[in-house]
Image: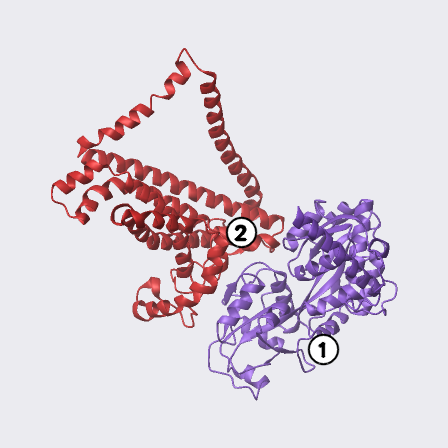
Amino acid sequence: MKLQRFARLSAVALVGVLALAACGSNNNTSPSSSSSASSSGSGAAVSASSAAPAFCASGTLNGSGSTAQANAMTQWIKDYQTACPDATVNYGQVGSGQGIKDFLAKTTSFGGSDSALSPTKGETSAANGRCAPGTAVDLPMVPGPIAVVYNVPGADNLVFTPAVLAGIFSGKIAKWNDPAITALNPSAKLPAQAITTFHRSDASGTSDNFTEYLAAAAGGAWSYGHDKQWKAPGGQGAKGSAGVAQAIKSTQFTISYDEYSYARDNQLQMGQVDNGAGPVTLTPDAVAKAVAAAKIVGTGDDLTLSLDYATKAPGAYPILLVTYEITCVNGGLPADQAALVKGFLSYVVSDAGQQKLVALGYAPLPTEIRSKVQAVIAKVS
Amino acid sequence: MSDEQPPIEEVLATLAPAPAPLSTGRSVRPGDRIFAVLSGGASLTLLLIIALIAAFLLYRSIPAVRADTTNFLTTSAWFPDSTPSTFGIAALAWGTLLSSLIALVLAVPVAVGTALFIAHFAPRRLAQPLAYLVDLLAAVPSVIYGLWGLFFLVPQMVGLQTWLADHLGWFPLFSVGSGSTFKQTMLNAGVVLAVMILPIISAVTREVFLQVPRDHVEAAQALGATRWEVIRLAVLPFGRPGIISASMLGLGRALGETVAIALVLSTNYVISWKILEPGGNTFAANIALQYGYAADLGTNALIASGLVLFVITLVVNIVARGVIARRREFAGAAG
């Protein structure tokens, strides 16, 4: 009891401080507002309740889906609940497929998926049915870079072209000192060792987007299409982003692809990617440039992106996935849920919310796409 | 030695007719009746649950197998959500049986040895704590075994596996193609499974060994048998059905193990003897790895593979029961 009371008291105190911080930084209507959530300018003793930001709603909001955006969601939920003490947000890390199923079954009010609802598989119509009388929308929210990770001692920042990556991952380029690799990296000392490729053994959006990149950018050198399951022969499998990172870290002369945050946190060697406009190192800004090159192909309020994996925009890092939040606009959600979805997603897409992404190893949405997402979120009702 | 057997049969005999008065006796007490209904209800519920699970698996499997464009039983690939949908359980069944077999081969001798030591060799002061320790192994969650396997065992096993491949590579089981990393191999998966099933097998065999009639042991000793001969003549023959059923319990766990395999094994859909190469897959691991992204057909396909595992486990259990029953007859006749 005593402990509980103490916890509650400290929680209230924390909420007070952070609510002020978030409130000072968040302003949906003006994207140019100051973005630092931690620099709380207001030291005045205002109570948390009277300072609740505009995006706050009360009640419990349930969402579930992609694990690729799980780290971002965890951070956002923590910040949102701190700013809005009356709100509870839960995000189940169940995978994109299950996230869509949960959303269709009305167990959740929003789903997270690393691919947009597929019209050809009937997902779009099913989701529109679930959202009647409103419509279902895909909102791009979390751009996640995919790093080319490898373990070759003494050969940092190797440069790869899509054709060379396709050759390596389909087994046609079998040695590290293959002329195709040395031609791109004349100054690197590459050993005459066999290349061991790793891929995800579980079905994943990371595999899907990486193979889609190879299929789109390698110009015919990749013949296995794109899928959530790894379809090319050979290579070894490892479970999850953490499993891949562990495999690369512990085994020399290996190469794989992995979410940027795992590559960074495990200090793996990361390759530069040259799509034709020079080698590009993976940075959040470089990823944001590639997202900006994407076209919006969704109709109406739907903001499904078509990523241009073969983009030759200078300084754009082209291998990435974008996680969508799927929810209903113009009706389809109970009033309290609509208020929560609107409030939470408004926070997520705000300056403060998007700024959090960089530290977590994601990239922020480009301004143009962000303002479109904000316009659609305003229609959640 | 059959003269020494009656005590057990007596016990059994007293147990067997016991239920009779419950149903036919004149003075049925309400407590008895309530207990009979409760225990009968419990076993009926169990049967019902198993039947419902089987029905559910069957119900969800049929549409998947219908949609499969290849032979469900002989195909090794697993791409149910692709067009055309191609998937089959051949590689899964192979990998499941192979990994479980490796686990049994490694675990049974160690488990029986441990049980013998605890039951007949160790001083009482050592036997109790040792038994507790072995039982404790059974309480470790399988994901812990998986992480232990991936982060500790796998790197440690590289040396042994390289040695095996270098010196025994002529044997098909230990041959490797060029460039095996000797890491996430079938053998490593089998070793992790072996550690996981060891406590079950050991605990059950230990209990059986402790049941060996004192008279058997003393008779052997009176004939001048050494300790090893006592074990060979009295303990092992008596315990054989117990060892078999313990191994079957262990096999059941190995067949269904999920997380540890999913973590340790580098999965693919290839049928191969080469246990020193990364690769292979099992039913349970495949379900765990593919479920998150499976669409409707994919989910049904995974459930269909679950049905096959269900049937395999059932068959294994029935065979084991048969073996035990026959052994018991032999023991009775020969002894």
Parent chain of label 1: A
Q: Taking A97 as reference, is B310 left or right? A: left
> Residue at point 44% right, 19% down?
B32
Q: Which residue is mark 1?
A: A312
Q: Are marks 1 and 2 in contact (CB under 8 Å)?
A: no
Q: State whether discs 1 and 2 lie on one chain.
A: no
Q: Secondary structure at mark 2?
A: helix
> What label sits on residue A69 in the rendered view?
none
In which quarter of the view is residue B163 placed? bottom left
Is A207 drawn above or below residue B135 in the view shown?
below
**In the image as oriented, which residue stretches furthest toward the bottom?**
A187
Please tell me the colour of chain B.
red
How many badges with numbers are in the image?
2
> What label sits on residue B287 in the rendered view?
2
Q: Taking B150 as reference, is A298 left or right? A: right
On-image quarter of the C terminus of chain B:
top left
Give the Cα separation between the discs numbered 1 and 2.
40 Å
In which quarter of the view is residue A374 placed? bottom right
Q: Secondary structure at mark 1?
A: loop
Where is residue B299 shown, x and y percent of the image? 59, 48
Where is residue A46 shown, x and y percent of the image? 85, 58
Q: Taking A342 as reference, is A230 left or right? A: left
Label 2 is placed on what type of residue?
Answer: Ile
On-image quarter of the N terminus of chain B:
top left
**In the image as oriented, which residue stretches furthest toward the top?**
B26
In the image, the chain rendered in purple is: A
> Residue at point 39% right, 13% down?
B25
Identify which residue, A328 or A38, lies in the foreground: A38
Parent chain of label 2: B
Please rate how many residues cluster around mark 2, counting C-alpha atoms within 10 Å: few if below 14, some from 14 to 19, many from 20: many
**Is residue A118 at all visible to an observer of this figure?**
no
Label 1 is placed on what type of residue?
Answer: Lys
